[in-house]
Image (cartoon, helix red, strand yellow):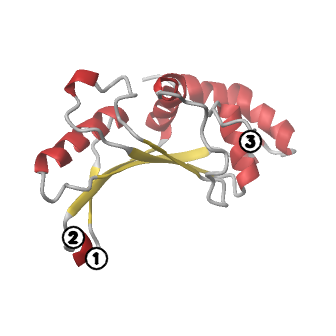
Amino acid sequence: MGQSRLKARYQEAVVPQLQQELGDKNRHSVPRVTRIVISMGIKTASSDAKRLEAALADLGAISGQKPVVSKARLAISGFRLREGMEVGAFVTLRKERMYEFLDRLISVALPRVRDFRGLNPKSFDGRGNFSFGLSEQGIFPEIEGDKITYQQGMNITIVTTAGTNDRGRALLKAIGIPFKRPE
């Protein structure tokens, strides 16, 4: 497995561009993406085991690695939730798989979202990490549309070394994340 297309573009074009734009003298101080976390919360996982299995299969196909099942830490009677119940799944992508997923997300999946006008540029956490949600898993090419039994949304968090929102925004814009234009 060779170097991904996005990683090569990051090293050859994005790093020098950001170095000049952000005024960094050392190319190692330029922000970079360290990991991507994809998570799915499954509301009815406790009562419907097939729903959890379908979500795990879809998340595994999208990410290319086995998802981890997350369990409830607290018991909340109002939500009929007991401690230890399976309530979701997540995957943490790093290195080559992370770049491959990010490339597929930017070039294939996001353009397939209906009425897509860009991601919210204000969805940063204060340290340069960016989070957004997708309402369905069917936009990914690995998922066959006619085999979807349950529509399932997901949250995606892109963790960077930026330190500030402005540096993180500059990094993700240079990589190719489509942000909404201010109106």
* First in residue order: circle 2 vs circle 3: 2
Residue placed under numbered mark 2 in the picture:
81
**Contact, CB < 8 Å: mark 1 with mark 2?**
yes
Q: Quadrant of residue 86?
A: bottom left
Query: Measuring 19% from the left and 48% from the top, which residue is drawn there?
Result: 52
- Element type at mark 3: helix
Query: Measuring 60% from the left and 31% from the top, which residue is drawn there?
Result: 117
Mark seen at residue 74 = 1
User: Which amino acid, mark 2?
Assistant: Leu
Above or below for 82 versus 109: below
- Element type at mark 2: loop
**Residue 75 appearing in the image:** no
Q: CA distance from mark 2 to mark 3?
A: 41 Å
Above or below for 7 versus 59: above
User: Which amino acid, mark 3?
Assistant: Ala
Q: CA distance from mark 1 to mark 2?
A: 8 Å
Where in the figure is residue 60, as x and y percent of width and height? Answer: 28, 38
Q: Quadrant of residue 88?
A: bottom left
- Element type at mark 1: loop
